[in-house]
Image (cartoon, rainbow, N blue to C red):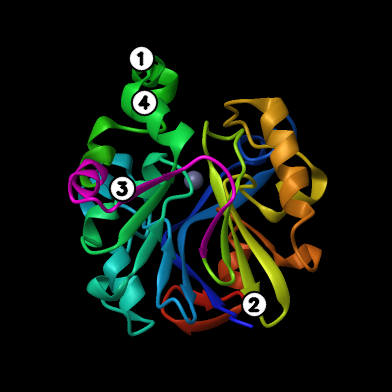
Amino acid sequence: MDTYRIYALRYAGPEESSRALLMWNRDWDQRVERAYYFWCLVGPEGPVLVDCGVTPERAAQRGLKNFHHPVEVLAGLGIAPHEVRHLVLSHLHWDHCGGAGFFPQAQVHVGQAEWEFWSTSPLAQRSICTILHEPGDLDALVTAQQEGRLHLHTGYARLAPGLELVPAPGHSPGLMAVKVATEKGEAVLASDCGHTFANLREDWPSIFIFNLPQWLESMERLRGLVAAPELLFPGHDIELSKGYEEVAPGVTRLV
Ligand SMILES: [Zn+2]
């Protein structure tokens, strides 16, 4: 049985906001910390990244606090960019895909609906969408497409034994979660299908809703895939840093 270790790599944060940002339309009077992550899966298929952080330029433009270059954070695991075999982009919001150019040899995996929306839909140019994504975010993906490294997925897809891509739309048009075989059983990286553990546990999306019915279905789907509730990991919860063993600066081992 092929199993993987899962690492969370924090490339920015913590930052603080009203909890209503992450728990849609409630808890206006409470504060919550969030951070910015990508993930590394280490196992038989070589290092696989789920998302990739952003460039220093985009971090500065967006005013990210405590930014660390994703390549330097990854170096804490002793992994160089050219060793990354697969890069799964859970979705194409700026904070998840902007660093794709750091990994020019990786096979890149994106949900087909995600790719089509952000690369072709006129709606993607509307201001409510441009706060989540900018055209420049796709440059490295266009290059990957020209080089035959861009793989678009429409449903469940097996990346390798023990690694499966799972459709989880709702926060964005074609968000993909990643199901991972671990020594503790099946785990799922939900990315922003749940910004925090509370979203997934309490069945409550954040304010960044693209399609609410789809989102509710996706959360239910992901909860049904894990061997235990604590093996369903969210996208921005500061607990990903605080609740696990830190194995290198900004890097924690989740499983
Ligand atoms: Zn995000």
Eyeballing the image, is 83 above or below 78?
above
How far apart are labels 4 and 1 at the CA level? 11 Å
Quickly name the residue at label 2.
182
Q: Is residue 89 magenta?
A: no
Screen quadrant of the N terminus: bottom right
Quickly name the residue at label 1.
122
Secondary structure of the residue carrying tag 1 is helix
> What kind of residue is marked 1?
Pro
Q: Earlier in the sequence, mark 1 or mark 3?
A: 3
Quickly name the residue at label 4.
130
Q: In this image, 246 relative to 130: left or right?
A: right
Q: Earlier in the sequence, mark 2 or mark 3?
A: 3
Q: Earlier in the sequence, mark 3 or mark 4?
A: 3
How far apart are labels 1 and 2 at the CA level? 41 Å
How far apart are labels 2 and 4 at the CA level? 37 Å
Residue 17 in picture, x, y percent from top left: 56, 42
Q: Earlier in the sequence, mark 2 or mark 4?
A: 4
> What kind of residue is marked 2?
Thr
Numbered mark located on residue 171 in the image: none
Question: Which of the two discs, 4 and 1, sits closer to the camera?
Answer: 1
Screen quadrant of the C terminus: bottom right
Q: Which residues are magenta?
A: 141-159
Q: Is residue 143 magenta?
A: yes
How far apart are labels 2 and 3 at the CA level? 28 Å
Is the CB of mark 1 within 8 Å of ligand 1?
Answer: no
> What kind of residue is marked 3?
Gly
Eyeballing the image, is 140 above or below 41?
above
